[in-house]
Amino acid sequence: MSDLGRPTWSQAEQRAAQGDAAYMRELGEQLADRHAEAVRQVQECERQLAHVVRVLALTPSRDSLGHLLQLLDEKRPSTGHRPLLPLVASLLAEHHQVTDLAASVFDRRGLDHLDELYVCLFHELVLRGVETDTFPALRSSPRVRPPWHPLSWLPAHRRDVESGADFPSRSINGSFYGVPSQLPVEGRVDPPTPRTSERSALRDRATTDVQESIVAAVKAGEWGDHGAWVFMLDEAIAPERVPALLPTLPMPCVDGLAPTDRFEIAVRPLDEIWRLLFATASMGGMFDSGVHGAYGRLWAWRSIAGLSGAPAGASAEEVEHRARQSTWFHFEADTDWFHGDIDSDYGIAALSPDRRRIAVLAATDTD
């Protein structure tokens, strides 16, 4: 039992054959203890490594950038269940001058393992309003928009609907952020109460692919629960009829809603809906840091595509065109599905341009 550094299969089988079950149990206990200690040490090393990377990323100087890039390229560290490079890209975009990033990151040669950093950093800068065309290294480098990368689907320039994107405020010792999910006062179109108790005969027609598209932003942010539904109408309806129709639809998020229970709804512009979805994905839920700006941008547009009914394979420009022609709603309800916590529940509904399709996303960050 003294040499647990190299226990062998043959040792274990021999002692088992001799009927020494006590030895086997003790061996297992000691190995379990060693494994637990090794896991603890790995986790502690990951925390310390993550802090060192964070300090380097948040120190605004070309010298820090150079050493950070060397560390990332040579050691390719991993610090948790989320990929590290999208986070680093977000931190760099928040705390460094674009001129330094262009010179030290995009113009730097010999970094063979940082393609993900280049791509994510490019989109982080786009979202922050950087005119990338003014920097040759960002404009011409094939590394920032390789055709094989999923982020290459995104526009190379910030769209007007993206100009209100929310970003976390981060320092070496902490972060501050929040998802703007509260229902606004402006644009309210609450249906009068008591509402009808009659349920709609419409049925959910969402395919698996469409559902996955609609909930893309919420899944990326790892919120507590979510649902997606699509209803095809027999005839076109005016947007004014949607607030009364939504509480009657066969959706778990409004199950049990009585005629006088709270159901509040507002018409929202596309940019506010995009902003909400972007924050959901990029900053994540209560116990998660999200996928950060670059991928948050992608998953927000993916959800917009599903909600607006854009065809599979549509370009970003086609998705935006269809989304601008849709009518968007933001709602809340007092049901068991929604928990009513601030910044933790919301519903989105989209009426298609032909007014014969209603798509709904419901999200809650409480289990």
Image: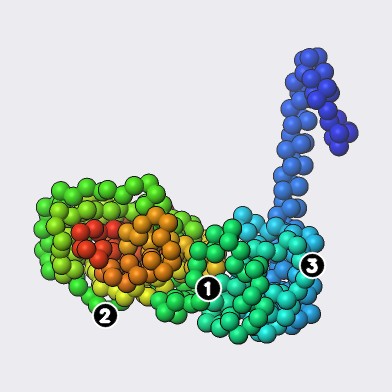
Q: Position of residue 41 (x, y in %)?
A: 75, 53
Provide the residue designation for mark 2. Answer: 186
**Disc count in the image?**
3
Residue at x-position 80% and y-position 62%: 74
**Picture coordinates of residue 69, whole percent (x, y):** 75, 70
Left or right: where 146 falls relative to 311: right
Q: Residue at x 15, y 61 (%)?
A: 236
In front of the other: label 1 or label 2? Answer: 1
Residue placed furthest toward the top: 18
Q: Amino acid at mark 2?
A: Glu
Q: CA distance from mark 1 to mark 2?
A: 32 Å
**Residue at image location 41% in from the left, 60% down from the top:** 314
- Marker disc for residue 156: 1
Q: Quadrant of residue 8?
A: top right
Label 3 residue SS:
loop
Q: Secondary structure at mark 1?
A: loop
Nearer to the camera, 294 or 24: 294
